[in-house]
Image: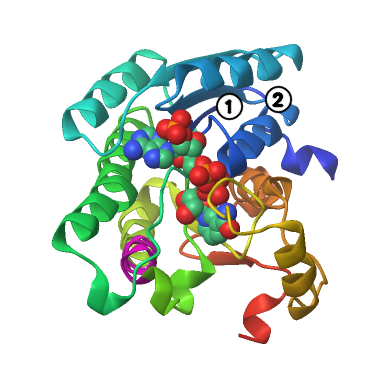
Amino acid sequence: MSDMFRLDGKTALITGASRGIGRAIAMAFAEQGARVLLTARNMELLKEVRAQVRELGVSCECFAADLSDMKEVERLIGWAGEQGPIDCYVNNAAFTAYKKPTETSPETMAALFHTNYRASIMLAQAVAAQMREHEIPGSIVFITSINALSPLPGQAAYSSTKAALESMMKSLASELAPFGVRVNSVAPGAVLTDMNPHFTPEKIAEFSPKIPLGRIGDPEDIGGAAVFLCSPAAGYITGSTIVVDGGYLLRR
Ligand SMILES: NC(=O)c1ccc[n+]([C@@H]2O[C@H](COP(=O)([O-])OP(=O)(O)OC[C@H]3O[C@@H](n4cnc5c(N)ncnc54)[C@H](OP(=O)(O)O)[C@@H]3O)[C@@H](O)[C@H]2O)c1
């Protein structure tokens, strides 16, 4: 039974792996035996994660790229292509803007869509092409958000980028199923990372009781779901979204 969750012999590409949820996903994949390819902008932080992953006895490489820039995304695709076939792709990198719909400038909308959506799809297209070429029964996972399913007006354009990813996830799942490639998403609720600087100890104490499971999520909570979706245990799952929010959507 436990082997159903192992990823030995697999190579996983993880974006936004320098900190927060992406870093936890990288560690979770390494703990299950996967070779891990890391990317984000901050090379110093990536090297720290690489060292932690290698301590677990698995191979790890990293590459710095700014996903807001299409040329950098193309450079990343080139590098990933040189690392050998990729079995698992976890699309995690993103940023948010705390703006209401009527207050979101075209520049902010474009920036959010370039990093959170355009780069994600360019990478997924490249990974899917090499999975098909090498006949790899691969797995693609988009880290979206409960805001894709129940939008927060205060993060309007961010929520829209995540809803767009949810939609594309389903289209890709349909297109790639005949090739044995599965595509799913994980929609986290609130998680304690740099993305939520407003979570002071007072705010955490105030917000936690509003969550049915009584606490805000840790990055590791998301790592487990991403590993599951890439593991043999999820071999019959495609086009699905796993909500990892401690039950918060039940009450929002
Ligand atoms: N935290 C939450 O409550 C929460 C809730 C729902 C969904 N999520 C989703 O979970 C994922 C991870 O979020 P997080 O909370 O871990 O956020 P985070 O702590 O802010 O980390 C974001 C990651 O993305 C990378 N990144 C950001 N902009 C980038 C760019 N232009 N190019 C390349 N890499 C970039 C960052 O690395 P560098 O700065 O080194 O580039 C970092 O590794 C995101 O997709 C987010 O939308 C988070």
Query: Which mark, by number, is residue 10?
Result: 1
Q: Residue 111 versus residue 49: which sits nearer the camera? A: 111
Relative to residue 247, is residue 131 drawn left or right? left
Q: Is disc 2 in contact with disc 1, using a CB cutoff of under 8 Å?
A: yes
Q: Residue 5 versus residue 72: which sits nearer the camera? A: 72
The answer to whether residue 237 of the structure is visible from this angle is: no
SS at circle 1? loop
SS at circle 2? loop
Figure quadrant of the N terminus: top right
Q: Where does residue 32 sit, x and y in percent of width and height? A: 73, 31
The answer to whether residue 134 of the structure is visible from this angle is: yes
Q: Within the image, what quadrant is residue 207 found in?
A: bottom right
Query: Which mark, by number, is residue 33?
Result: 2
Residue at (84%, 41%) from the top-left corner?
Answer: 2
Judged by its main secondary structure, the magenta piece is helix
Q: Within the image, what quadrant is residue 78 found in?
A: top left
Residue at (43%, 77%) from the top-left corner?
Answer: 151
Q: Within the image, what quadrant is residue 10 found in?
A: top right
Relative to residue 201, is residue 158 drawn left or right? left
Figure quadrant of the C terminus: bottom right
